[in-house]
């Protein structure tokens, strides 16, 4: 897992490290790493045209020193200074000595470039870009663009983006991941994130937010042992679907089956549809869910919001096993929050509108919103989005790096909730089960989208290939 650190912690670590190093050594490390990544993006460095968008301070200095390194390799490097009176003087001197030159900070100087390096605003920036910087950011959208540390106009602590900002193809970030390049709108605007090691790790505090990586998933996902039977692999119960929404039951139950559960029990109103598709599922039509033996429950997709659905939700939440509440179940909790007062773990999986029914927000700071809701509700919260956030009641959080906008389709969340139920039943800690489910679901979405816009059924069908892809690394 890679740690994700707020700006204040990164700055404190940088200050501690700089006190141990010769003057300028930390910037030299950052600029060298930036130059290497820029060179990798160019077909060839010699003769390429590079435009540096240079703001004040160290972020602009990183761009200038990297530009100097590229100029020494034969690139034609032009620096567009947004504020010449506050430019990093030593970085500018290095660029001009290497053969780079200063040109007018005008959009036409950007459009003819092979590569744009965004060094306008660093991790301390807040709000969108203004005036000349906004015009340059707009012009850069037509050119391969590398952002220095964080795309200018994106809040490095939250991922919130202003009206005008850099849309990078690659973001080269230094020392540690920041929330703004992996969360919220910033996750899209950052493009591919490449982390350059500048020696911060020994002086950073323990992380409280992480991004899961494929090796983490391979270690987390349950593998049956030689002596395991269907019960040892986990028994998950599913309450999903209704006569009006049979598909929700099919999708959630199917995801539990394909997600690795050893035994799936179904207790809902779509029994015939479930058995027609999954004869291995045990259906309980006239039994209260609380009377069934399971290791975890998934409840909510397509169950409706009438009194009968509310009573079933109360029955499930009255059990002493982990429960995932999704969709209609979350809507019901909005008017019956006391149902969450239970000793066993609960996982809520809302999209933004569902989130607003049980908590305040979400705000542009999606990480903070999810954390606050998890603490207030005493539940793990999986806030769906372009970069899904999982927050535990104790403050730990994970930001999911996988997925595709094509997952925003009817029924996709039903697949996620069934998969999560299977992982919980297998014994994973609820927050990690939620983070793992989001990761696998995202990979399945990516695989399903390779042949065009996928349906939720396509995502379900891609679950097993996704699990296999992760296992194989």
Image (cartoon, rainbow, N blue to C red):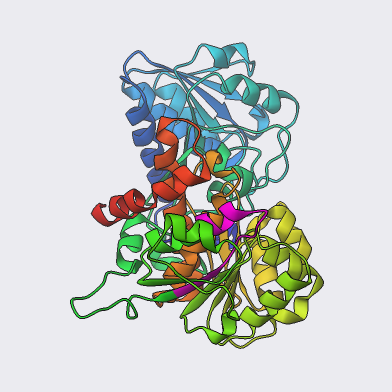
Residue lying furthest right in this view?
335
Q: Which residue is drawn at 59% across and 41% down?
A: 57
Q: Which of 104 and 153 is in front in this view?
A: 153
Asked if residue 246 lies in the magenta stretch, the reply is yes
Q: Position of residue 426 (x, y in %)?
A: 39, 75
Q: Is residue 402 something one can see in this rendering?
A: no
Taking 206 as reference, is 139 left or right?
A: right
The N terminus lies in quadrant:
bottom left
Q: Which of 276 and 230 is in front in this view?
A: 276
Asked if residue 245 lies in the magenta stretch, the reply is yes
Q: Where is residue 8 in the image (x, y as percent from the top left)?
A: 60, 61
Q: Residue at x 45, y 56 (%)?
A: 276
Q: Position of residue 166 (x, y in %)?
A: 60, 32
Q: Residue at x 61, y 62 (%)?
A: 349
Q: Which of 34 and 251 is in front in this view?
A: 251
Q: Is residue 199 something one can see in this rendering?
A: yes
Magenta range: 236-251
Q: Which of 198 and 157 is in front in this view?
A: 157
């Amino acid at each position: 897992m890679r740690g994700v650190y707020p700006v204040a912690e990164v700055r404190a670590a940088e200050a501690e490290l700089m006190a141990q190093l010769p003057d300028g050594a930390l910037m030299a490390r950052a600029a060298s790493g930036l130059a290497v990544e820029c060179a990798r993006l160019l077909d060839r460095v010699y003769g390429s045209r590079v435009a540096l968008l240079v703001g004040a301070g160290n972020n602009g200095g990183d761009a200038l020193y990297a530009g100097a390194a590229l100029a020494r390799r034969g690139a034609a490097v032009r620096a567009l200074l947004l504020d010449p009176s506050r430019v990093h003087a030593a970085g500018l001197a290095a660029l001009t000595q290497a053969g780079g030159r200063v040109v007018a900070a005008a959009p036409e100087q950007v459009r003819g470039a092979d590569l744009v390096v965004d060094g306008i605003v660093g991790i301390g920036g807040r709000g969108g870009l203004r005036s000349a910087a906004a015009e340059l950011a707009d012009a850069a959208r037509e050119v391969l663009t590398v952002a220095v540390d964080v795309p200018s106009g994106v809040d490095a602590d939250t991922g919130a983006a202003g009206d005008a900002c850099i849309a990078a193809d690659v973001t080269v970030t230094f020392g540690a991941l920041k929330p703004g390049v992996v969360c919220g709108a910033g996750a899209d605007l950052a493009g591919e994130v490449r982390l350059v090691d500048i020696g911060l790790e020994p002086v950073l505090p323990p992380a409280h937010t992480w991004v899961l990586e494929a090796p983490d998933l391979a270690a987390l996902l349950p593998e049956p042992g030689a002596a395991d039977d269907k019960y040892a692999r986990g028994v998950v119960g599913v309450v999903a679907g209704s006569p009006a929404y049979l598909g929700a039951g099919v999708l959630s139950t199917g995801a539990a089956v394909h997600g690795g559960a050893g035994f799936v029990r179904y207790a809902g109103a779509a029994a015939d549809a479930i058995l027609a598709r999954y004869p291995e599922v045990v259906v309980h039509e006239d039994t209260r869910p609380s009377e069934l033996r399971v290791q975890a429950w998934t409840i909510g997709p397509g169950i409706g919001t009438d009194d009968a659905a509310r009573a079933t939700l109360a029955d499930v939440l009255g059990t002493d096993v982990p429960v995932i509440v999704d969709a209609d179940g979350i809507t019901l909790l909005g008017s019956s929050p006391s149902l969450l007062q239970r000793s066993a773990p609960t996982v809520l999986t809302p999209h933004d509108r569902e989130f607003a029914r049980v908590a305040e927000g979400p705000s542009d700071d999606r990480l903070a919103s999810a954390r606050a809701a998890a603490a207030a509700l005493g539940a793990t919260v999986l806030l769906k989005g372009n970069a899904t956030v999982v927050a535990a009641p104790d403050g730990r959080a994970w930001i999911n790096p996988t997925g595709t906008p094509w997952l925003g389709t009817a029924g996709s969340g039903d697949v996620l909730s069934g998969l999560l139920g299977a992982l919980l039943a297998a014994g994973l800690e609820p927050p990690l089960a939620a983070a793992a489910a989001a990761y696998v679901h995202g990979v399945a979405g990516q695989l399903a989208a390779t042949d065009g816009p996928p349906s939720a059924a396509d995502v379900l069908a891609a679950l097993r290939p996704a699990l296999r892809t992760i296992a194989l690394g």
